Image (cartoon, helix red, strand yellow):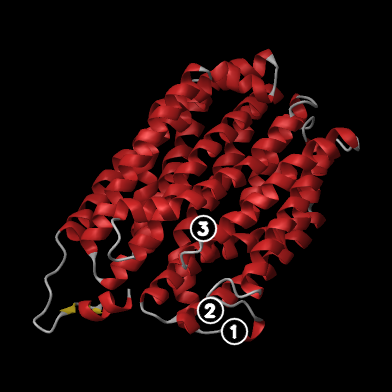
């Protein structure tokens, strides 16, 4: 972690995480594709229930990223026993939360789907799809914790195996349940929760069979203030980001619903495409995160700086290439999901507008991830809140009133550009410190971090 060239180290760690994220994103993309063969209202329902998927993930991601950040720092200090306690505590916390969500969600399913932005014509499909998805909430959320913690200890390949296996099953089962068993949109949901269960069991098996250096067991749960503070503190930026993403998705669905099911379906398809492309960027960033955390804890600020810029440059080039392609072939891409002229017209313009500023996401995402994993939750939270909350929500609410549907289509692009302008000065100070780290004391100590000699030997 402290001697390998950062470009080679990040690439080796990121390759399996990129695969994991792409395949994970394919879950919802596959459902959108196959459900799109039913009708436009069913396609819109997938967009509505996507907000529910985010809700299921929100605590899982928060606890997963929070514990993952803490675990990476603990392993950097060679505290493996406490790292296992953090893993077990995080795992059982999120299982309990998932059970609660399932119970409440099923009881209040009808008002829940309406709250998420469902129209009267979309509602029956949304209830059918969402009611089944809720059943998988506990283990779907727990999978995020295990996946993130495996990556934090450097076992990205094991994490990828669990995610990829479930996704392959989902792709196979979708057409079988939807068309073969004639279950319609309920078949898509059933295929999803079965495939997610398979992913969960595979990920759990890595801990049970001791392929991981970490352990998951009830006896390892630690009800300690410092433990909860570390997990929740580092994970709060992810919670804020996901929470405002839920609110943003609800507002988007509500605003688009004024213009009919085609508008909801068109914007839903665009969001799936952007999610799919963005998942590769996040996967690459997840290869950067443990490098940042480990080296920051060990006192090698310059390596964090170099790793950050390598990740930003690589991510920007990737997004430029794919944004250009998506912009050129926008109508053809939308048509793959729903061959409805109105859906294609609305979705193609929205996709092209988003592609204009989408490459800025590389700097935004890497800045946020760096802040999370070097223990700067305040900056990470502010940046996480900006893109989908502080910026996007007021933009879409204003533009939808002033420009109508066109304002809805251009709102995300404007939000990305504005958030980039916020991220640059927010990150500049931290990068300056990392580029020129504090000099060593005469004793060889880095202020607050211990002996550089010890860190090097431990790494």
Q: Which mark is residue 456?
A: none
The residue closer to the viewer here, 46 or 275, is 275
Q: Secondary structure at mark 1?
A: helix
Quarter of the figure that contains the N terminus: bottom left
Disc 1 and disc 2 in contact, CB within 8 angstroms: yes
Q: Nearer the viewer, mark 2 or mark 3?
A: 2
Residue 256: quarter of image = top right
Disc 2 crowd, CA 10 A, few/some/many (<14, 14-19, 20+): many
How many dots with numbers?
Answer: 3
The residue closer to the viewer here, 415 or 181, is 181
Disc 1 and disc 3 in contact, CB within 8 angstroms: no
Q: Residue at x 59, y 35 (%)?
A: 272
Q: Which residue is mark 2?
A: 84
Q: Which residue is mark 3?
A: 239
Q: Earlier in the sequence, mark 2 or mark 3?
A: 2
Disc 2 and disc 3 in contact, CB within 8 angstroms: no
Location of residue 347 in the rendering, given as x and y in whole percent from the top left corner: 58, 22
Query: What is the residue that sits farthest to the top in this orientation?
Result: 341
Q: Which residue is mark 1?
A: 220
Q: Residue at x 30, y 60 (%)?
A: 4
Q: Earlier in the sequence, mark 1 or mark 3?
A: 1
Location of residue 425 in the rendering, given as x and y in whole percent from the top left corner: 24, 47
Q: Secondary structure at mark 3?
A: helix
């Amino acid at each position: 972690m402290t001697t390998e060239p950062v470009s080679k180290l990040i690439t080796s760690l990121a390759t399996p995480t990129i695969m994991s994220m792409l395949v994970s994103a394919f879950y919802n993309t596959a459902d959108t594709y196959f459900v799109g063969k039913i009708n436009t209202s069913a396609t819109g329902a997938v967009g509505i229930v996507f907000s529910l998927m985010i809700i299921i993930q929100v605590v899982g991601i928060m606890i997963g990223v929070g514990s993952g950040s803490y675990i990476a720092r603990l392993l950097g200090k060679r505290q493996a026993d406490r790292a296992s306690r953090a893993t077990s505590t995080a795992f059982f916390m999120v299982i309990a939360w998932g059970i609660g969500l399932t119970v409440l969600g099923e009881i209040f399913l009808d008002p829940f789907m309406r709250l998420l932005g469902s129209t009267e014509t979309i509602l029956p499909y949304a209830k059918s799809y969402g009611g089944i998805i809720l059943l998988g909430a506990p283990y779907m959320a727990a999978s995020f914790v295990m996946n993130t913690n495996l990556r934090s200890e450097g076992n990205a390949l094991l994490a990828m195996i669990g995610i990829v296996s479930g996704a392959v099953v989902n792709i196979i089962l979708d057409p079988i349940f939807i068309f073969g068993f004639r279950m319609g949109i309920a078949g898509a949901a059933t295929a999803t929760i079965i495939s997610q269960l398979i992913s969960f069991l595979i990920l759990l098996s890595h801990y049970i069979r001791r392929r991981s250096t970490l352990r998951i067991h009830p006896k390892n749960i630690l009800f300690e203030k410092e433990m909860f503070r570390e997990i929740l503190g580092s994970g709060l930026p992810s919670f804020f980001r996901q929470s405002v993403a839920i609110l943003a998705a609800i507002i988007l669905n509500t605003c688009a619903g004024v213009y009919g099911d085609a508008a909801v379906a068109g914007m839903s398809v665009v969001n799936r495409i952007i999610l799919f492309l963005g998942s590769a960027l996040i996967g690459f960033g997840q290869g950067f995160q443990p490098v940042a955390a480990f080296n920051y804890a060990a006192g090698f600020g310059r390596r964090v700086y170099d790793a950050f810029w390598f990740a930003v440059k690589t991510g920007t080039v990737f997004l430029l290439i794919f944004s250009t392609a998506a912009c050129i072939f926008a109508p053809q891409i939308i048509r793959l999901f729903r061959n409805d002229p109105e859906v294609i017209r609305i979705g193609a313009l929205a996709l092209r507008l988003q592609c204009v500023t989408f490459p800025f996401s590389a700097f935004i995402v890497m800045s946020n991830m760096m802040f999370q994993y070097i223990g700067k939750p305040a900056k990470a939270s502010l940046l996480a809140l900006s893109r989908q909350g502080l910026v996007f929500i007021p933009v879409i609410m204003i533009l939808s009133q002033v420009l109508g549907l066109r304002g809805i289509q251009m709102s995300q692009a404007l939000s990305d550009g504005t958030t980039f302008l916020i991220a640059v000065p927010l990150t500049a100070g931290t990068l300056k410190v990392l580029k020129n780290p504090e000099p060593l004391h005469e004793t060889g100590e880095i202020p607050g971090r211990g002996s550089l000699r010890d860190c090097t030997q431990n790494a």
